[in-house]
Amino acid sequence: MRLATLRTPNGPRPAILAGDKFVDLVAADQRFPSSVRSLLAEPRLMSAAREIAMSSSSNGVPAKSAKLHAPVHDPQKIICVGLNYRDHAVESKMAIPKEPVLFSKFPSALIGHDEPIIVPSISTKVDYEAELVVVVGKRGRAIPESAAMEHVAGYSVGHDVSARDWQLEKDGKQWMIGKTFDTFAPVGPTLVTRDEVPDPHRLGIRLRLNGRTMQNSNTNQMIFSVAQLIAYVSLVFTVEPGDLIFTGTPPGIGHALNPPVYLRGGETAEVEIDCLGLLRNPVETE
Ligand code: ZN
């Protein structure tokens, strides 16, 4: 099942992909809540949504022309993992971490498929990072690794846009401030439920800039698995339905190239993950 959040004149609406159309769930049935985040917390309504996805419907928005938010547009938390691919840690001249390296983004950084990434005027080193995003489906604290996958609603394609000058050249090297500019967290186009992704650690992951492949790897290169990450972060805080976990990026980031490559207005960034789809965002200058 593929869930999305539509942009409508009435605000964000949860939707489901039925064939090649998105069906507005609230329009289909008033029982549905007004956000995918709330829907994830209700297993009974998730089953009802699945039935709508199966039944052919003519009352949808064609997927090609739908305007989308990030699939969860209002998460409580966006948790990000740094240096989670072996080759990327080497490329960044950082030691392979023994425990996950964590930072966060604010929900104000989220955008959906086809929405523009804005390069701020106060950065000259805006970089790209293709990432698998995990969407939490069930609340939990101190979750054992063996039970962690039960807390996963599904997955999406993410782009951890990063201003390297703000991330690495400021006092204290505060990662968050370089990674949470508005529009620096594209996610989408849809949330693909866990049952459709038999193994999240065997997915090709690629990033193209203006059609040129810059990153090309596989999630089998991850240092910490999805279950290990959920177990680790839930030692510290409660994970909630709709929370997003960006799971780190493979090698090929622009900052590590010689000469370096940074995002510029007029370009198009595409992140593609097997099974999950293609997230495309134009780049604009502030
Ligand atoms: Zn990242």
Image (spheres, helix red, strand yellow):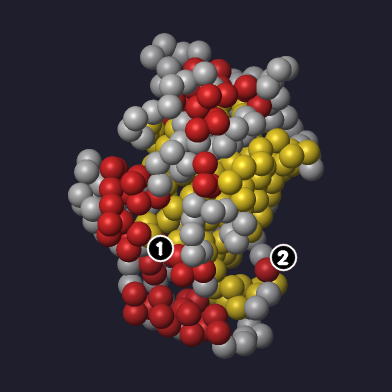
Quadrant of the rendered image containing residue 253? top right
Three-letter amino acid code at the position of disc 2: Ser
Q: Position of residue 198 (x, y in %)?
A: 49, 65
Which label sits in the foreground, 1 or 2?
A: 1
| Count of picture labels | 2
Three-letter amino acid code at the position of disc 1: Ala
Residue neighbourhood size for the residue with mark 1, other residues' Cα within 10 Å, grouped as few (<14), some (14–19), many (≥20): many
27 shown above or below 108:
below
Q: Identify the residue position indicated by label 2 in the image.
A: 65
Q: Position of residue 126 (x, y in %)?
A: 62, 27
Residue neighbourhood size for the residue with mark 2, other residues' Cα within 10 Å, grouped as few (<14), some (14–19), many (≥20): few
Q: Residue at x 50, y 76 (%)?
A: 25
6 shown above or below 209:
below
Q: Residue at x 59, y 20 (%)?
A: 122
Q: Position of residue 205 (x, y in %)?
A: 61, 47
* Mark number, residue 207: none
Label 2 residue near ligand 1, CB within 8 Å: no
Q: Position of residue 258 (x, y in %)?
A: 71, 17
Query: What's the distance in space between the residues labelled 1 and 2, CA to CA?
Result: 26 Å
Q: Dot 2: what SS?
A: helix
**Residue 284 can be seen, yes or no:** no
Q: Earlier in the sequence, mark 1 or mark 2?
A: 2
Contact (Cβ within 8 Å) of mark 1 with mark 2: no
Q: Identify the residue position indicated by label 1 in the image.
A: 153
